[in-house]
Amino acid sequence: GSEASGEKVYIIGTDTTFAPFEFQNDEGDFVGIDLDLLDAIAEDQGFEYDLRSLGFNAAVTALEAGQVDGVIAGMSINEERLLKYDFSDAYYTSSVGVAVKADSGYSSLADLAGTQVVAKTGTVGASFAESIKDEYGFEVKYVEDSSTMYQDALTGNSSAVFEDYPVIQYEITRGMELKVITQSEEGGEYGFATLKDKQPELVEMFNKGLQNLRDSGEYDEIIARYLGE
Ligand code: GLN
C-alpha cells in the first residue's frame, strides 16, 4: 500500500472480465458486484483504496509479491488457499460450470474425450479440469482471461470452458452461444483475500462493512443491480 496525506490507501487487485462481478461497462467504467461491494464497504468503513484491474492470476501473484494489499475477484475460499491467505466472510456462493458451444454435439463430460478444453490460469475451474482430465481423456489449455476463454470455445478451438457457473450463466443470458453441460460443487464461496496475517485490520473492516450492507439492504440492492430481484 501507499500513504496519501497520512492516510493509508489500500491497493486492491481484481480480474479484468468476470461479469457480473467485475467488467467494463459501455462507458468503459469498471463495474460489477465485487466492485460495488468494495466501494460501499470502503465508504461505510471510511478507508481509501486504489483499484488495479490485473486479471485473476496476475492479481493473486501481485498479492503474493506484496504489490497489492487485497484481492476481490470472485475468488473462491478453499482449504489450499486458506493456508496462504486470510479471507473475509463469504459474500457469494458459486460453483464451477462446464460449458460448450450451444450448437456443438457435446452434451456430457464423456463427449470431451480426445478434445482440448480451456480454463483460466490459477482458478478453481482449472483445478477442476485438471482433476478429471485423465478420467475423461481431454487436454487442458490455459489462458489468462475469460474473454479469450469464451472465444476459444465459440470458434471451436476448444470443446469446453471451465468457468464459474454464475459467470457463464450471466453471459448466456446476454446471448453468448454456450450451454452448460455440468456443474461441480468445487466453486465454493467467494471471499475478499489478503496475504495471511498481513492485513488483519483490512479483513476486519471488510467483514464489518459487509455485515452493515447486509443489515441495511444495500447488499441485496447491489446483487439486484446486476442479477435482478
Ligand atoms: N472463483 C474462481 C477462483 O477463485 C475464479 C475467479 C476468477 O476467475 N476471477 O479460482
Image (cartoon, rainbow, N blue to C red):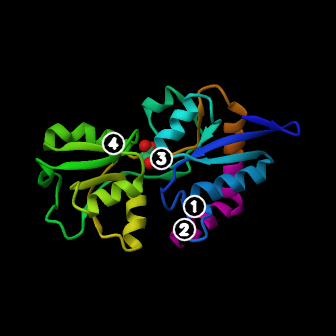
Question: In the picture shown, does residue 141 fall above or below 102?
Answer: above
Label 2 neighbour load within 10 Å: few <14, some 14-19, many 20+: some
Marks 3 and 1: CB-CB under 8 Å? no
Q: Name the residue under label 2.
A: 226
Q: Pick whichever of labels 3 and 2 is earlier in the sequence.
A: 3
Disc 4 residue: CB within 8 Å of ligand 1: yes
Q: Pick whichever of labels 1 and 4 is earlier in the sequence.
A: 1
Q: Position of residue 85 (x, y in %)?
A: 55, 31
What residue span does the magenta drawing correspond to? 209-229
Is residue 35 shown left or right of residue 179?
right
Is residue 119 shown left or right of residue 37?
left
Element type at mark 1: loop
Q: Name the residue under label 3.
A: 189
Q: Name the residue under label 4.
A: 126
Element type at mark 3: strand
Q: Nearer the viewer, mark 2 or mark 4?
A: 4
Q: What residue type is labelled 3?
A: Glu
Q: Nearer the viewer, residue 229 or 15?
A: 15
Cα distance, mark 3 to mark 4?
16 Å
Q: Pick whichever of labels 1 and 2 is earlier in the sequence.
A: 1
